[in-house]
Image: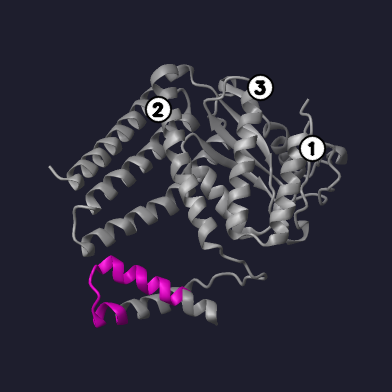
Amino acid sequence: MTVVDVVTAVLLLTGALSCLLGALGLVRFPDVPSRLQAATKPQTLGLLLILVGTAIRLEFESAATLLLVVLFQIFTAPVISQIVGRSAYRAGTLRSDELVVDELADPMARDDLRAAGTPVADVAVADVAVADVAVADVPADDVPGPAPRPDGEGPS
Amino acid sequence: MRRRLTQLFWLTVVWVLLWGTLSPATIVGGVIVAGIVTWLFPLPPMRDHVPLRPLRLLALAGYMAVDMFRSAAGVAWEAVWHGPRARAGIVAVPLLSGSARAVALIAGAVTLSPGSYVLQIDRGRGTFWVYALGMRGEGDVERVRRAMLLMQRKVIAAVGTAGELADCDRGIAAAGTEKTP
């Protein structure tokens, strides 16, 4: 039993354990976003560990392809998770009684009102301290109403 | 033009890695495919020069790797111990960079870490909202916010300009001192 064997065994077993715990979370968590966390993240980590564990046993040609899989997994997993999670929030499948705090509910409701053409009190717009960001390069469709004024007075 | 060439180069490298053999045929094929891809899907023009700091990029990768393990352990603990009683929260975090690339990288980094993902980004308000699993009470709100600010600091240190980094530090200082009601 060489060092490589031990490293591979540790990587593969840790990866498998991570996937198992993710599956457990998928069964046990209460709503869509938390299940999404269990379904995507530990699986990503588990897959990475298993692929790395496999790659160190292979010759370079095959290992390179596996590393490519790792790379694409890292790039694509957040995008999927983000899109599904956001849809879950907008569709209302997120159980609000599960949330300790929801600081998005107010701003989003206000955005919806403004998108529907209802005038909204201007004071309410900048409710979180606005950093020195370039407001000018925001795409027009991101700001449906009057441009937010960067004069926030701290989070509400 | 130089950007098109680097893009062409990296796409070719991906293609060659995909085939797993370094032969003239795969290289020529890769260049052709990369040319078609860059022609069909041109990237939007970049207005500003973005510095790349390899060491800090490496530090960021290391931090994210450690963070992945730590957060995966946290999610696993939630799953095993709390299960159906798991609680989460949505926290507003000030966005400390205006550059599209930094924002994209920040969102990716946050979402890659187990237990949290970005729900909404509002660059006009300079705020993004993060869903975080495993929150228990009000104290966790600040903990999550601080962790997100730290992550942003690391990303901007890796791909931001010196001015952006200074802005980021000012933003962190402001967020650290202000009292949340």
Rendered location of residue A66, percent (x, y): 28, 56
CB atoms at circles 3 and 1 under 8 Å apart?
Answer: no
Q: Secondary structure at mark 3?
A: helix
The Cα atoms of the two marked residues, 3 and 1, are separated by: 19 Å
Q: Which residue is mark 3?
A: B138
Q: Between residues A34 and A114, which one lies in front from this camera angle?
A: A34
Task: Find the magenta span and give its range.
Answer: B7-28
Question: Which residue corresponds to the image point at 45% horizontal and 28% vertical from the top-left?
Answer: B74
Residue type indicated by callout 2: Ala
Tell whether position B11 is magenta: yes
Tag 1: residue type? Answer: Asp
Question: Mark 2 and mark 3, same subunit?
Answer: yes
| Same chain for the residues under marks 2 and 1 in the image | no
Relative horizontal placement of residue B161, taking residue A135 as reference (left or right): left
- Secondary structure under tag 2 reads helix
Outermost residue to the left: A1
3D distance between C-alphas at marks 2 and 1? 35 Å
The residue pinned by badge 2 equals B76
Q: Position of residue B157 (x, y in %)?
A: 61, 55
Mark 1 highlights which residue? A127
Specify the quadrant that holds the C terminus of chain A. Answer: top right
Is there any visible trace of residue B94 in the rendered image?
yes
Q: Residue at x 41, y 39 (%)?
A: A41
Q: Is residue A153 above or below residue B29?
A: above
User: How many angstroms separate mark 2 from mark 3 (CA)?
Assistant: 22 Å
SS assignment for the magenta stretch, majority: helix
